[in-house]
Amino acid sequence: MIVRLEGILLEKSPASAVVDCNGVGYFANISLTTSEQLPQVGQRAVLHTHLIVRDDAMELVGFATPAERDVFLLLVGIPGVGMRIALSILSAMSVSQLQEAIVANNLPVLQRIPGVGRKTAERLVLELREKIGAIAPARDGQVLPVLDEALRAMVVLGYNRQHAEKALRTAFDQCRAEGITPSVEQLVKLALRLVHNAA
Protein backbone atom coordinates (compact mmCIF):
# COMPACT_ATOMS: atom_id res chain seq x y z
CA MET A 1 0.00 0.00 0.00
CA ILE A 2 1.37 3.41 -1.00
CA VAL A 3 0.53 5.84 1.82
CA ARG A 4 2.94 8.72 1.18
CA LEU A 5 4.82 10.29 -1.72
CA GLU A 6 7.69 12.73 -1.36
CA GLY A 7 9.62 14.03 -4.33
CA ILE A 8 9.72 16.62 -7.09
CA LEU A 9 6.38 17.84 -8.40
CA LEU A 10 6.46 17.22 -12.16
CA GLU A 11 2.88 18.14 -13.09
CA LYS A 12 -0.05 19.77 -11.35
CA SER A 13 -3.65 20.48 -12.35
CA PRO A 14 -6.82 21.11 -10.31
CA ALA A 15 -7.57 17.36 -10.39
CA SER A 16 -4.22 15.56 -10.56
CA ALA A 17 -0.52 15.67 -9.79
CA VAL A 18 2.59 13.75 -10.81
CA VAL A 19 5.38 13.37 -8.26
CA ASP A 20 8.86 12.06 -9.15
CA CYS A 21 10.12 9.82 -6.36
CA ASN A 22 13.69 8.73 -7.10
CA GLY A 23 13.12 8.60 -10.85
CA VAL A 24 9.65 7.03 -10.75
CA GLY A 25 6.71 9.30 -11.60
CA TYR A 26 3.54 8.64 -9.61
CA PHE A 27 0.21 9.97 -10.93
CA ALA A 28 -2.33 10.84 -8.23
CA ASN A 29 -5.91 12.06 -8.39
CA ILE A 30 -6.30 15.04 -6.07
CA SER A 31 -8.90 17.54 -4.91
CA LEU A 32 -8.82 21.22 -5.83
CA THR A 33 -8.08 21.93 -2.16
CA THR A 34 -4.94 19.79 -2.31
CA SER A 35 -3.91 21.27 -5.66
CA GLU A 36 -4.01 24.77 -4.19
CA GLN A 37 -1.76 23.69 -1.33
CA LEU A 38 0.90 22.06 -3.49
CA PRO A 39 4.08 24.02 -4.33
CA GLN A 40 5.00 25.11 -7.82
CA VAL A 41 6.07 22.52 -10.39
CA GLY A 42 9.74 21.68 -9.93
CA GLN A 43 9.66 22.01 -6.16
CA ARG A 44 9.64 19.27 -3.53
CA ALA A 45 6.17 18.09 -2.56
CA VAL A 46 4.55 15.64 -0.14
CA LEU A 47 1.27 13.82 -0.74
CA HIS A 48 -0.48 11.56 1.76
CA THR A 49 -2.02 8.86 -0.40
CA HIS A 50 -4.54 6.06 -0.62
CA LEU A 51 -4.44 3.34 -3.27
CA ILE A 52 -7.78 2.14 -4.63
CA VAL A 53 -7.53 -1.32 -6.18
CA ARG A 54 -10.29 -2.46 -8.55
CA ASP A 55 -10.60 -5.38 -10.94
CA ASP A 56 -9.88 -3.20 -13.95
CA ALA A 57 -7.57 -0.53 -12.55
CA MET A 58 -5.57 0.92 -9.66
CA GLU A 59 -6.16 4.55 -8.71
CA LEU A 60 -3.80 6.50 -6.47
CA VAL A 61 -5.40 9.42 -4.63
CA GLY A 62 -3.29 12.12 -3.00
CA PHE A 63 -4.02 14.59 -0.19
CA ALA A 64 -2.28 17.61 1.30
CA THR A 65 -3.02 16.49 4.86
CA PRO A 66 -3.70 13.20 6.68
CA ALA A 67 -7.01 14.69 7.86
CA GLU A 68 -8.21 15.15 4.28
CA ARG A 69 -7.28 11.55 3.49
CA ASP A 70 -9.14 10.31 6.59
CA VAL A 71 -12.29 12.18 5.55
CA PHE A 72 -11.96 10.81 2.01
CA LEU A 73 -11.91 7.27 3.41
CA LEU A 74 -15.06 8.00 5.39
CA LEU A 75 -16.74 9.42 2.30
CA VAL A 76 -15.98 6.49 -0.02
CA GLY A 77 -17.28 4.15 2.67
CA ILE A 78 -20.77 5.60 2.20
CA PRO A 79 -22.98 3.75 -0.31
CA GLY A 80 -23.26 5.71 -3.55
CA VAL A 81 -20.21 7.89 -2.87
CA GLY A 82 -17.26 6.93 -5.05
CA MET A 83 -13.85 8.46 -5.57
CA ARG A 84 -15.07 11.19 -7.95
CA ILE A 85 -17.87 12.45 -5.70
CA ALA A 86 -15.61 12.29 -2.63
CA LEU A 87 -12.98 14.42 -4.40
CA SER A 88 -15.70 16.80 -5.59
CA ILE A 89 -16.81 17.26 -1.98
CA LEU A 90 -13.24 17.86 -0.79
CA SER A 91 -12.70 20.30 -3.67
CA ALA A 92 -15.76 22.32 -2.71
CA MET A 93 -14.92 22.80 0.96
CA SER A 94 -12.20 22.25 3.55
CA VAL A 95 -12.33 19.49 6.13
CA SER A 96 -13.48 21.98 8.77
CA GLN A 97 -16.17 23.44 6.53
CA LEU A 98 -17.48 19.96 5.72
CA GLN A 99 -17.56 19.06 9.38
CA GLU A 100 -19.47 22.21 10.24
CA ALA A 101 -22.03 21.57 7.49
CA ILE A 102 -22.57 17.97 8.60
CA VAL A 103 -22.80 18.73 12.32
CA ALA A 104 -25.26 21.56 11.59
CA ASN A 105 -27.29 19.34 9.23
CA ASN A 106 -26.84 22.06 6.60
CA LEU A 107 -28.28 20.23 3.60
CA PRO A 108 -28.50 23.29 1.30
CA VAL A 109 -24.73 23.85 1.59
CA LEU A 110 -24.00 20.18 0.90
CA GLN A 111 -26.38 20.13 -2.07
CA ARG A 112 -24.44 22.96 -3.72
CA ILE A 113 -21.54 20.55 -4.23
CA PRO A 114 -21.43 19.15 -7.80
CA GLY A 115 -22.69 15.56 -7.81
CA VAL A 116 -24.40 15.81 -4.41
CA GLY A 117 -28.19 15.73 -4.46
CA ARG A 118 -30.59 15.80 -1.53
CA LYS A 119 -30.45 12.05 -0.88
CA THR A 120 -26.66 12.01 -0.92
CA ALA A 121 -26.53 15.06 1.35
CA GLU A 122 -28.87 13.37 3.83
CA ARG A 123 -26.73 10.23 3.68
CA LEU A 124 -23.59 12.25 4.39
CA VAL A 125 -25.13 13.73 7.51
CA LEU A 126 -26.51 10.39 8.68
CA GLU A 127 -23.30 8.45 8.13
CA LEU A 128 -20.70 11.04 9.17
CA ARG A 129 -22.20 13.09 11.99
CA GLU A 130 -20.76 10.81 14.68
CA LYS A 131 -17.48 10.07 12.89
CA ILE A 132 -16.15 13.23 11.33
CA GLY A 133 -15.69 15.08 14.62
CA ALA A 134 -12.84 12.78 15.59
CA ILE A 135 -10.92 13.90 12.49
CA ALA A 136 -11.70 17.60 12.39
CA PRO A 137 -12.91 18.83 15.80
CA ALA A 138 -15.52 21.55 15.68
CA ARG A 139 -14.23 25.05 16.16
CA ASP A 140 -14.90 26.14 19.68
CA GLY A 141 -15.31 29.66 21.06
CA GLN A 142 -11.55 30.11 21.31
CA VAL A 143 -10.80 29.19 17.71
CA LEU A 144 -13.33 31.38 15.89
CA PRO A 145 -11.95 34.67 17.30
CA VAL A 146 -8.44 33.56 16.29
CA LEU A 147 -9.58 33.04 12.68
CA ASP A 148 -11.50 36.33 12.67
CA GLU A 149 -8.51 38.27 14.02
CA ALA A 150 -6.15 36.63 11.52
CA LEU A 151 -8.56 37.49 8.68
CA ARG A 152 -8.71 41.13 9.79
CA ALA A 153 -4.91 41.24 9.88
CA MET A 154 -4.61 39.95 6.31
CA VAL A 155 -7.25 42.37 5.02
CA VAL A 156 -5.34 45.24 6.66
CA LEU A 157 -2.22 43.99 4.87
CA GLY A 158 -4.08 44.46 1.60
CA TYR A 159 -5.08 40.89 0.74
CA ASN A 160 -8.39 40.04 -0.91
CA ARG A 161 -10.83 38.97 1.82
CA GLN A 162 -12.05 35.85 0.00
CA HIS A 163 -8.53 34.67 -0.85
CA ALA A 164 -7.32 35.42 2.67
CA GLU A 165 -10.19 33.49 4.26
CA LYS A 166 -9.53 30.47 2.05
CA ALA A 167 -5.79 30.50 2.86
CA LEU A 168 -6.50 30.88 6.58
CA ARG A 169 -8.91 27.94 6.61
CA THR A 170 -6.32 25.82 4.82
CA ALA A 171 -3.66 26.94 7.29
CA PHE A 172 -6.00 26.14 10.18
CA ASP A 173 -6.71 22.67 8.80
CA GLN A 174 -2.98 21.97 8.41
CA CYS A 175 -2.32 23.00 12.00
CA ARG A 176 -5.16 20.87 13.33
CA ALA A 177 -3.91 17.90 11.26
CA GLU A 178 -0.60 18.26 13.11
CA GLY A 179 -2.33 18.52 16.48
CA ILE A 180 -1.59 22.25 16.84
CA THR A 181 -3.99 24.94 18.00
CA PRO A 182 -2.51 27.91 16.16
CA SER A 183 -2.12 31.49 17.32
CA VAL A 184 -3.10 34.46 15.16
CA GLU A 185 0.55 35.02 14.23
CA GLN A 186 1.06 31.36 13.23
CA LEU A 187 -2.09 31.38 11.10
CA VAL A 188 -1.17 34.59 9.29
CA LYS A 189 2.40 33.44 8.59
CA LEU A 190 1.25 30.10 7.19
CA ALA A 191 -1.58 31.69 5.19
CA LEU A 192 0.82 34.23 3.67
CA ARG A 193 3.12 31.40 2.62
CA LEU A 194 0.19 29.58 0.99
CA VAL A 195 -0.91 32.71 -0.87
CA HIS A 196 2.61 33.39 -2.16
CA ASN A 197 3.13 29.76 -3.24
CA ALA A 198 -0.14 29.88 -5.19
CA ALA A 199 0.80 33.12 -6.93
Image (cartoon, rainbow, N blue to C red):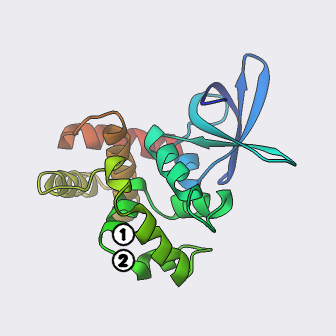
Location of residue 114 with respect to 59 vertically, above or below? below
Asked whether 181 or 199 is in front, the reply is: 181
From the viewer's side, name the closer residue of 115 and 13: 115
Please say if the residues under marks 2 and 1 sit with CB atoms less than 8 Å apart. yes
Q: What's the distance in space between the residues labelled 2 and 1, CA to CA?
A: 5 Å
> Residue 153, how many percent across, how many down?
21, 52
| Residue corresponding to mark 2 | 106
Residue at x 31%, y 55% (from the top left corner): 158
* Label 2 SS: loop
* Residue at 56 percent of width and 30 percent of height: 46
Q: Is residue 123 rendered to the left or right of residue 30?
A: left
Q: Residue 115, image x and y in percent?
A: 62, 74
Amino acid type for the residue under numbered disc 1: Ala
Q: Amino acid at mark 2?
A: Asn
Q: Residues within 10 Å of mark 2 (few under 14, many from 20)?
A: some
Lower position in the chain sequence, tag 2 or tag 1: 1
Q: Nearer the viewer, residue 186 or 53?
A: 53
Question: In the displayed image of the protein, which residue is found farthest to the right?
Answer: 56
Reading the image, the residue beneath label 1 is 101
